[in-house]
Image (tube, coloured by chain):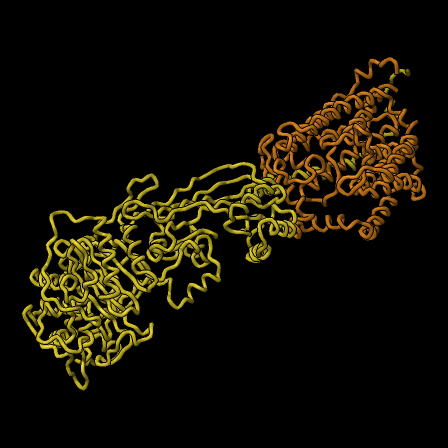
């Protein structure tokens, strides 16, 4: 792409671009809050790294926006194989923290392949499902290949263990199959199947994962154990009140009452300092972003674009829903980041790249 | 590039639109749910959760007020407060309590630390409250803990102001002691908290509200592991006020030294004010062992000690007054005119009353004896006659008026009233009529009569000041920490008994001869340059027939009589009145009188009498004092 079509600039989706930047800006503020008053007295090195990731992410988002998204179809399988390979590497030689093995140490950067896997699974499924389904939609036989494409990375992610990402992979696959054209009867069958499989799934959960589910159902049962996180997060959010305690004035985060406060529980940090007002603004930004993604899907030039937009928007939606649901005590604790806001290079850069692809889809509907 | 044209209808997308719309409906539903949940937490439940957030981070720490000091009459400190170091552990801040305690026991000496932590836990003390594991660390222990501080997270040194009695057991019963508040106290006293000191006995107890002050508080912000980060708010404590006592440190020391190892008590009063100059009781205890919690074994030892070291004999010890009671007989008889100063009776060494003989202490008798000599030589037979003429009820009326048989009202707990019998009293108590023979025993301060040393000191003071019964006070003033006077306590007159000056003069003269005449029973209290007036007494411990008086040496220690001496001086312008009892010592003239003498001497050394040379009352005759005399 030696020269850029003037129309790409003309039709560039500044709305989505701005929303992505606004959310990552809130992310930086929240990481500042979450690390304020720690051992570094002032700006934590974490903040600097997050700034760097936002910079890299913005560059990648711009590059993706300027690239014809259809080329992604060409490399989808290769990218998928690469992502699965990385997950295998993690399983074999991953860098572990806190009991789970999730990272590949690249020296300057700890890569989290599960974040790459989410993009890869969307890409490969969209690539596979881009052809029109037969009349009446796909049936069970059509779903064998997509199920396998999901199962390999999902199993590897569960092994880490990373229940949250596995859940997102399943949800996003379901979303794509649903939008792509699943037979209505099949939809009902799959839903019933999920309900029946749930007790079997329980059997395979790790004890701490079961504990989280139990404590979610009754947080007071063990206030200093698993329920502790839920209670402290609710206290943080609730103590923020309508208008919040003010930037850097949250006590729950500053005094380390919140767990994983730069990543999984960053919403609580933000909600404590900016209150109900700030939370609604943040939810509003996500709503706008998701609505924009859905609009792009609706108006995309081809099925590949539509499903790709649904896939990436879906990642944002499911992660926001589960992360906030967890922080507010409506869902059990699973490790899922708040897209574009939580600290973490892999998730941030992957997410911004995905946003770039959305812009590309939107821009190119005028080009062919 | 292909020319851009709108070919909407040919696009595949519209077929997917309904499902995208369906997804968007789900998105909207989820986001509305999230908003409602946020509204619930941040608006509806805000106050509750904000309080929980504060409770997470704020700990209230009390700043106990420094307890007021106690001074003697010349502002010399008797009780102060000095820092003491305790090792405390906050279980919540200690990652592994058991191993920490094991290592701590190795460092500062093995003891029962683990049990203390367990007990605190069983008592329901919250984990963030410090538990004291070792009290009153000595200096090497403090240094050891300070240097190894980093190896003991959650363990710290707590500096506690601890009550310190500068002269150990000196005036122990008067000063009292402090101890940790009990659960019962806590229910009654809302301002107190677990671990606070409270006055348990003596001045510490009766002046608790003055000495205590008001505790302050600090709001301290802590992080999730309980590290104290900063102070948010502080209400400073108000230190307690100091108490200035009326007692004189030097006099108190002399009195206690003079009593020595014997059991007994001494009360010295300023007869013109009722201020107590010295109050001694032996055996005593060391109040320092109570400060910061007494070991239960030490406590058991104190309360089971047969010599009752915790009892303040000055106000709790009740003894028959013996011959000192003849002073009451004299005032009663002279004022009621059942005798005059020239009345004389014959003492043949004993009289028969009913079917038994009532003996005088002097077997050969005193012969014809009048009032003056009867006091000086303490003739029993003379006062048997005086008593018979008065009758028990008149003796009782005068005794009551002079303050005997009832509490003096001193600001100390557990004061005893003693007993002054009367016919009405006996009727009430035993439902029996009074037998005239019993009046004979009463007349010489035996039988049912029982008094406390402070009552006899008050009696001496009344003879000295002409019949004014002051409330005995041991606090003259309350000072603030900066030394400014908060309150003073002027003398309080409890009762004024009108005693004829003639009668007083005769009685004082006789009491002066008790000490100064060569045949006086209290010669042992005589001092150079000052005329001391006094009266000896011997209180019988074993009820026995008056006739069967035995040589004291023949009795075992616990059956020996108590020796009394009451005195005041100088006889013309009295400055000090004293009563002293020495238990199981025999005759007051030989045991209690020297103690009084020592105190008198010290008093006049400290307060030399103004004016010219003292008047020396010439002694009557020169008989040697009988060792049995009382």
Nearer to me, A284 or B408: B408
Q: Residue A275's x, y, as percent? A: 61, 34
The mark tally for this picture is 0
Q: Classify residue A57 as left or right of residue B437.
A: right
Chain B image colour: yellow
Q: Residue B113's x, y, as percent? A: 58, 54
Q: Is residue B306 above or below residue A133?
A: below
Nearer to me, B80 or B34: B80
Q: Residue A236's x, y, as percent? A: 62, 39
Residue drawn at the location 79% of the way across and 34% of the way down: A315
Q: Classify residue B36 as left or right of residue A178.
A: left
Task: Indicate the quadrant where residue A123 lies.
Answer: top right
Task: Indicate the quadrant where residue A75 lies.
Answer: top right
Residue drawn at the location 52% of the way across and 40% of the way down: B220
Chain A image colour: orange
Q: Classify residue B200 as left or right of residue B519.
A: right
Q: Is residue A246 above or below residue B332?
A: above
Residue drawn at the location 33% of the way across and 42% of the way down: B480
Q: Quadrant of the C terminus of chain B?
A: bottom left
Residue drawn at the location 59% of the way across and 41% of the way down: B147
Q: Residue A241's x, y, as percent? A: 58, 37
Q: Can residue A133 be seen in this view?
A: yes
Q: Can residue A295 be seen in this view?
A: no
């Amino acid at each position: 792409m030696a020269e850029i079509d003037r129309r790409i600039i003309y039709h560039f989706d500044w709305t989505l671009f701005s929303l992505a930047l606004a959310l990552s800006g809130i992310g930086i503020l929240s990481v500042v809050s979450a690390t304020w008053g720690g051992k570094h007295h002032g700006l934590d090195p974490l903040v600097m790294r997050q700034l760097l990731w936002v910079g890299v992410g913005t560059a990648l988002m711009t590059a993706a926006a300027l690239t014809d998204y259809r080329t992604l179809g060409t490399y989808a399988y290769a990218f998928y194989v690469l992502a699965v390979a990385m997950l295998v590497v993690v399983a074999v030689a991953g860098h572990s923290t806190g009991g789970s093995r999730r990272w590949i140490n690249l020296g300057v950067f700890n890569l989290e392949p599960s974040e790459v896997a989410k993009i890869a699974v969307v890409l490969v499924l969209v690539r596979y499902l881009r052809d029109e389904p037969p009349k009446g939609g796909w049936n069970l036989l059509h779903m064998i290949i997509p199920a396998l494409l999901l199962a390999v990375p999902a199993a590897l992610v569960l092994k880490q263990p990373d229940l949250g990402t596995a859940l997102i992979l399943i949800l996003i696959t379901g979303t794509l199959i649903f939008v792509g054209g699943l037979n209505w009867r099949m939809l009902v069958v799959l839903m019933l199947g999920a309900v029946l499989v749930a007790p079997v799934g329980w059997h395979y959960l790790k004890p701490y994962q079961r504990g989280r589910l139990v404590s979610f159902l009754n947080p007071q049962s063990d206030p200093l154990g698993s329920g502790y996180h839920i209670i402290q997060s609710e206290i943080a959010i609730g103590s923020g009140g309508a208008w919040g305690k003010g930037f850097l004035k949250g006590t729950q985060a500053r005094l380390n009452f919140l767990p994983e406060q730069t990543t999984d529980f960053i919403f609580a940090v933000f909600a404590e300092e900016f209150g109900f007002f700030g939370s609604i603004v943040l939810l509003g930004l996500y709503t706008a972003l998701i609505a924009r993604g859905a609009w792009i899907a609706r108006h995309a030039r081809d099925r590949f674009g539509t499903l790709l937009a649904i896939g990436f928007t879906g990642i944002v939606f499911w992660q926001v829903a589960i992360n906030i649901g967890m922080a507010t005590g409506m869902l059990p604790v699973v490790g899922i980041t708040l897209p574009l806001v939580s600290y973490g290079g892999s998730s941030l850069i992957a997410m911004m790249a995905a946003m770039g692809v959305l812009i590309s889809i939107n821009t190119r509907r005028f080009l062919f | 590039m292909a020319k851009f044209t709108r070919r909407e209808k040919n696009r595949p997308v519209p077929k997917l639109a309904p499902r995208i719309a369906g997804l968007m409906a789900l998105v909207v539903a989820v986001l509305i749910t999230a908003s409602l949940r946020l509204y619930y937490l941040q608006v509806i439940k805000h106050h509750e959760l904000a309080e929980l957030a504060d409770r997470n981070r704020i700990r209230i720490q009390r700043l106990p007020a420094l307890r007021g000091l106690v001074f003697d009459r010349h502002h010399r400190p008797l009780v102060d407060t000095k820092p003491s170091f305790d090792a405390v552990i906050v279980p919540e801040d200690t990652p592994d309590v058991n191993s920490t305690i094991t290592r701590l026991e190795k460092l500062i000496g093995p003891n029962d630390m683990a049990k203390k932590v367990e007990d605190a836990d069983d008592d329901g003390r919250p984990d963030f409250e410090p538990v004291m594991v070792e009290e009153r660390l000595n200096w090497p222990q403090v240094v050891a803990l300070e240097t190894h501080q980093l190896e003991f997270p959650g363990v710290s040194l707590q500096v506690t102001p601890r009550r310190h009695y500068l002269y150990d057991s000196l005036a122990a019963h008067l000063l009292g002691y402090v101890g940790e508040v009990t659960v019962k106290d806590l229910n009654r006293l809302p301002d107190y908290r677990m671990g606070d000191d409270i006055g348990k006995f003596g001045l510490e107890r009766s002046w608790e509200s003055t000495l205590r002050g008001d505790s302050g508080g600090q709001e301290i912000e802590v992080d999730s592991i309980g590290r104290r980060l900063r102070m948010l708010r502080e209400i400073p404590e108000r230190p307690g006020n100091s108490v200035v006592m009326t007692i004189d440190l030097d006099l108190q020391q002399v009195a206690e030294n003079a009593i020595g190892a014997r059991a007994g008590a001494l009360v010295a009063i300023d007869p013109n004010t009722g201020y107590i100059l010295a109050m001694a009781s032996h055996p005593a205890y060391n109040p320092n062992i109570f400060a910061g919690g007494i070991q239960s074994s030490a406590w058991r030892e104190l309360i089971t000690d047969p010599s009752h070291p915790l009892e303040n004999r000055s106000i709790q010890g009740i003894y028959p007054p013996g011959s000192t009671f003849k002073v009451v007989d004299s005032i009663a008889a002279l004022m009621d005119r059942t005798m005059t100063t020239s009345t004389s009776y014959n003492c043949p060494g004993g009289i028969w009353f009913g079917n038994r003989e009532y003996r005088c202490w002097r077997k050969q008798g005193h012969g014809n004896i009048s009032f003056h000599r009867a006091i000086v030589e303490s003739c029993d037979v003379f006062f048997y006659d005086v008593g018979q003429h008065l009758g028990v009820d008149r003796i009782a009326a005068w005794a009551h008026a002079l303050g005997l048989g009832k509490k003096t009202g001193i600001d100390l707990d557990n004061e005893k009233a003693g007993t002054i019998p009367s016919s009405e009293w006996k009727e009430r108590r035993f439902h029996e009529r009074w037998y005239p023979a019993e009046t004979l025993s009463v007349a010489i301060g035996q039988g049912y009569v029982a008094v406390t040393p402070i009552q006899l000191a008050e009696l001496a003071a009344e003879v000295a000041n002409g019949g004014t019964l002051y409330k005995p006070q041991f606090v003259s003033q309350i000072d603030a920490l900066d030394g400014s006077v908060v309150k003073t306590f002027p003398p309080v007159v409890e009762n004024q008994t009108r005693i004829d000056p003639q009668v007083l003069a005769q009685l004082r003269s006789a009491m002066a001869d008790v000490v100064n005449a060569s045949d006086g029973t209290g010669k042992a209290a005589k001092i150079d340059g000052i005329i001391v007036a006094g009266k000896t007494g011997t209180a019988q411990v074993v009820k026995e027939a008056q006739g069967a008086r035995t040589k004291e040496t023949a009795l075992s220690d616990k059956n020996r009589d108590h020796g009394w001496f009451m005195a005041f001086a100088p006889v013309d312008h009295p400055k000090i009145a004293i009563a002293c009892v020495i238990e199981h010592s025999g005759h007051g003239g030989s045991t209690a009188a020297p103690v009084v003498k020592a105190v008198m001497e010290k008093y006049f050394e400290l307060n030399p009498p103004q004016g010219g040379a003292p008047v020396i009352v010439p002694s009557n005759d020169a008989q040697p004092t009988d060792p049995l005399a009382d």
